[in-house]
Image (spheres, rainbow, N blue to C red):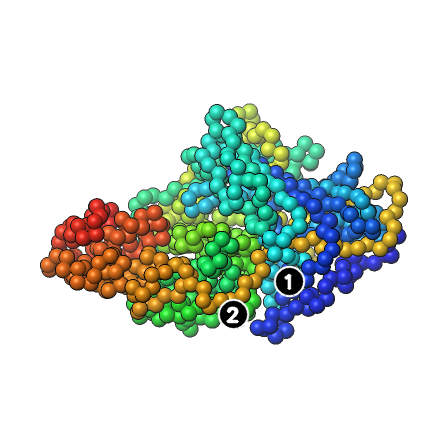
Amino acid sequence: MVPKTKIREKNDKQENGEDDKRTNSSVPGTKMNCYGLLTVQKEPVPLKSIEVELEVRDHVATVVSTLLYQNKEDKPLEAVFVFPLPGDAAVCHFSANIGQTQIVAEVKEKQQAREEYDDALSSGQQAFLLEESDQSPDIFSLSVGSLPPGESASIRLEYVTELAVQADDGLRFYLPAVLNPRYQPQGSEGGSVQVTSVPASLVPYSLSFSARVSSPRPVSKVESSCSLDPLQYLNTEQTQATVKLAAGHKFDRDVELLIYYKDAHQPNAVVEAGQTSAKPGTLMGDPVVMLSLYPEFPQAVMSSVASCGEFVFLIDRSGSMDCPMDNRNPQQTRIGSARDTLLLLLKSLPMGCYFNIYSFGSSYEHIFPKSVEYSEKTMEEALKKVEIMDADLGGTEILQPLKHIYSQPCIPSQPRQLFVFTDGEVGNTKEVINLVRKNSGYHRCFSFGIGEGASSALINGLAKEGGGHAQFITGTDRMQPKVMQSLRFGLQPAVVDISVTWDLPKGVSVTVLSPPITTIFQGQRSLIYAQLTGQSPEAAEGCVTVKYSLAGHPSHNQLHFSLKPADDTGLTVHRLAARTLIRSLEMEEREHRGQQDGGEKKKVVELSVQSGVSSSFTAFIAVNKDDGEAIQGPLLRRNVPAPTKGLMKRCSMMATSYGAPYSVDSCSVSQPHRDPLLQLVSLQKASGCWEIHPALAALLGKTSEEVEMSKPESVKEEVWATILALIWLHDFMLDVQDEWQLLAMKAASWIRAQKAPCVTECVEAGNAMLGCEVQKDSLGI
């Protein structure tokens, strides 16, 4: 038998000691041992393959992963695999197959599960443990214990998750493969968990992936950052389809699918019957309804853009931001794309607002001591600082700059909007999200996860708790259109006085399981889970009404739905509802830690065990209790490596069309590598206008003399230059209109304010000079 000893203590001693003690050289004494890169030992890897089957029903995904382990060594093994999952996933099933024997895991309180696992291994039994990281809900650890020589084990892991709505109305599913190092600031909550990592291209196990998509509406297309086989429709209505990764896919990047339906995102409700074996009156025993609401705002209100607000931009400048956005274009770095995006953001802000820019790594900086009014002078001062920003601030310590931002008093009549840009390699995720939640009444938070391996728990958590919107920029995505969509959300008038009322048949009561809705954006989905208690008559209907006020205008949206349970939903809605309630209770527990008797933790454990959904206080444990011989000999630990992008060496020579520094004062013809749109944008004034400038003329394919000679008489040079810039944008850059729409609106508003004569004549002259056919009405002037 294996001598009885605590497995975690034994495992820590067996890790590579030198790399365990690795520190961040830029911050003496600050460990980077949470998910640190460890030296890869030349040892056999017992994990041989991962097979993933995805089933998407409308906007909910069920994912089944099968991991095949095989021990080809002459001693029994313990295999430990630390890997990422989507941060909002509800893990609801874990089982192991050894030969003809299947062992289904149970959810138990985490410490109890760990002790049962240790005891089983000490007694020579096979055991399996799956647990969520204490620091971040998107990191899991899977321990396969006492795998005898020559034996195989098949592990089945199942989770359900909602699919996020993207800017172009696609639904995003992603299977995280890349687990980047997570920076653990000194003194932050919780311990650290070790993971063995290798470059993504050297992962020694294979991945196969297939997906089945179904919806009441036709599936129009499925796109991916990875190569896919052609979409196969399963019926003539095209409401069911299958797709799989093309042969030869390497497990070297996150798998992302974008799913598009025709006439997508209509409000709907799904009522799911309770579990027959569960007690009525409990969450699993009663029906649960999932409401998907897509509020539509009055067009008159939406046509107006707010001209006030305090816009605070928080930029990650840790060393990992020097990694490329995509391996296929190593010159386009994350920090370079962030610089270009800041240029667009600053040019698109309305006159009269306030702004500031923070950047962070192991320490943090801010351009102004406090937010300043937006003007030509402050904009130029900020852009000069932005152009020299580099990924040179060490680790990823986001907590301190957030605390400083929240310590600044809010500006009256200027609602605070926080934009956070990070590659999400943060170890103290729950601590950061908790801080945002505490300050959610004073701001909206928009978050952007940059590059492969960004923590979904962090990015989604910031936006959810901050009442904003989350975006992920991966692969060949351009950051700018997604960021500008969020800025448009930030410029929407804030929705206030939100209330949800229910109208249900007599004898049916409702318990809302989701947190109260605190923010609504035009066309964006709001999800509500609720437990229905009592008996409803046949063919009964319910109704939910969402009321709110927008820019002083009261409004409401209503959804009528049948109370008849849907067929064959497999308790998916119940598990998602349980996950939602568990996350809310966990947040409350962190807020009240040390103040109460642990009531929230007890509720989480009870709900997690009852629903079979994992939590931070529970774990899945399975022990093979067959009456076989005890497994003899000391266990060899084998750490299954997770793919990581790693840190790229900084290279000051990196410069490409989206990554090169720019100068506000010297955007000249000598920068042919610069993106033409960014060249034009960098010349725009804070007020929205352009001036006749050699760089503008060169961009238009003319000389300054030709531009001046074509100007109609009695028209100011700034009006003429601004009209030419707008014509060029509408004719040559129409395919990226999302990126420049706001600054074009500002330019058109500036022209209208000039009450300039001969505007129609200017547009006609501009079209003639540039060889375009842009209509005056389309310019908004």
Q: Nearer the viewer, residue 1 or 42?
A: 42
* Number of the label disc, if any, that sits on residue 393: 2
| 357 lies left or right of 640 | left
Instruction: Give the quadrant of residue 160.
Output: top right
Instruction: Give the quadrant of residue 290.
Output: top right
Amino acid carrying mark 2 in the image: Leu
Which residue lies at the image location 64% right of the left edge and 62% below the top edge?
A: 36
- Please rate how many residues cluster around mark 2, counting C-alpha atoms within 10 Å: few if below 14, some from 14 to 19, many from 20: many
Q: Residue furthest left?
A: 713
Q: Nearer the viewer, residue 351 or 376?
A: 376
| 726 lies left or right of 164 | left
Q: Which residue is mark 1?
A: 36
Which residue lies at the image location 46% right of the left edge and 31% below the top edge?
A: 218
For the residues labelled 2 and 1, the Cα–Cα distance comes to 18 Å
Give the mark count: 2
Amino acid carrying mark 1 in the image: Gly
- Please rate how many residues cluster around mark 1, counting C-alpha atoms within 10 Å: few if below 14, some from 14 to 19, many from 20: many
Percent coordinates x, y for residue 177 in the rendering? 59, 50
| 674 lies left or right of 264 | left
Q: Residue furthest bottom?
A: 28
| 83 lies left or right of 72 | left
